[in-house]
Amino acid sequence: MASFGYQFYRQCSLLRVSSLVASLHTLRIQHAVQPLVPVYSLPASSSSHKHSWVIPERCRWKTCRFTSTGRAVQLQDKNNQDGLQNSLLPYEGQNQQKAAVLESAVTDSQVVDLESASPLSPFEEISDEEALQIAAQPQLPPASVTLRDYVDQSETLSKLVLLGVDLSKLEQRPNVGNMLLRLDFETDIKERLFFLKEVGVEESHLGYFITKNPFILTESMENLQDRVSYLKSKKFSPTAVARMVSKAPYLLNFSVERLDNRLGFFQKELGLNVQKTMDLVTRLPRLLTGSLEPVKENLKVCQIELGFKENEVQHIVTRIPKLLTASKKKLTGIFDYLHNTMGIPHNLIVKFPQALNAKLLRIKERHLFLKHLGRAQYDPAEPNYISLNRLVSLPDEVFCAEIALASLNDFEMFQKTL
């Protein structure tokens, strides 16, 4: 009976030992430490059966014994006290080993978290705070019929708008919109704007200037400086250059050779000296940039159809340069009414050439009103003479009070009868 009890106790002890070894093996895998090594010591007597555990020196944690009741009790052996105290203190290799284990555990957990994270769904509901934090950049349209779609995303277009450039007019011109989108404001535009200001173009006029001539932004700085230097070499004053560039935005797009040919044309065709030629193009700079066909046609009309002499044509165009670019129909219509209807000779028209630049309707209304009053007298040798200059230039109130000697109401009532 005693032998059977001893064998039963031995089997239970072995089960406990195997369970403890399995636990320690699992702990070794998780923490990468050396397992405990069980060493059996034979019991001294049959009445006291004990099992001792010997732990390796560098991984010793705690030395225990199991009593017959299966209870673990710390050994009080004096020989094991020093080893037990030493095993409770950490050593250098142990600290490094723990750090490596923790780092590996953190990395593995991050990988697991990334792999386990489900991808975001476009149908997933989010809070209002998260929605406000989303910065969605609108994409530029690949093609558009208006520059308005690109203003918010293009620094060049937005700054041109601030300058006063009318993009609605520029986008109607072929290839201008694409040209502006390819330009960079800092490298392509800024320097040319400063150059125009140095020449004399007012800052408030830059928007109008670019609207009229956006191609100035593609001209090289060297060419622009050469053309301004050429005008100054021809004795044009800085004020004259500023006026010419402001009034004729395409002037600086013309090469030096072309500008020189234009100045030579007017000097030769009109028979003017250098100073009068300079005064002519300063007063009307678009003569240098516009077409020469209307100029040639009007010169022939004045000499052949209207009957003016060459010196008379010179006097007329130097006084009123706009007549060189006026429409032929308007020019011949006004001259016909002044000369054939009102009976004014060539010499008086040459003396007051501004009459050729007035509105034909105004001349008709005032002449008929004076004729109705019996005051249509345009001969300087006769009394109550009325000059052409006062006839066409005075406002209605002054014309009625000083020339017609009638009230403004009478003149307005007469206009209704025409």
Image (cartoon, grey):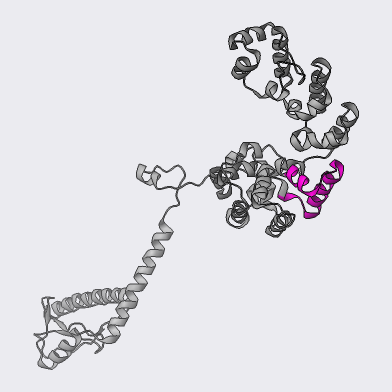
Vertical relation: 155 (above or below) 44: above
Residue positioned most to the bottom: 79
297 relative position to 243: left or right? right
Out of 134 and 343, give the one closest to the viewer.
Answer: 343
Question: Which range of residues does the magenta coloring cover?
Answer: 252-281
52 or 305, nearer to the observer: 305
- Quadrant in which the N terminus is drawn: bottom left
Residue at the top extreme of this rendering: 417
Q: Nearer the viewer, residue 258 or 68?
A: 258
Image point 79% across, 49% down: which residue? 274
Residue 121 vs 69, above or below: the answer is above
Residue 418 in view in this figure = no
Camera sees residue 61: yes
* Residue 14 spot, x, y in % from top left: 22, 78
Residue 184 position within the rendered picture, expressed as x and y whole percent measured from the top left = 61, 54
- How many numbered markers are drawn? 0
- The quadrant the C terminus occupies is top right
- Residue occupying the point 76% across, 16% down: 382
Query: Which secondary structure is most common in the magenta stretch?
Result: helix
Report the residue at 55% width, 47% height from top: 159
Describe residue 60's horizontal placement relative to residue 78 as left or right. Answer: right
Q: Residue furthest right?
A: 304
The answer to which quarter of the image holds residue 323 is top right
Q: Position of residue 250 (x, y in %)?
A: 71, 45
- Please identify the quarter of the rendering in which residue 219 is found: bottom right
In percent of width and height, residue 308 lies at 87, 30
Residue 257 within the segment the image draws in magenta:
yes
Residue 366 sits inside the magenta stretch:
no
Quick one: 199 or 311, which is closer to the camera?
Answer: 311
Q: Residue at x 31, y 77 (%)?
A: 99
Is 298 situated left or right of 93 in this image?
right
Would you place residue 233 above or below residue 140 in this image?
A: below
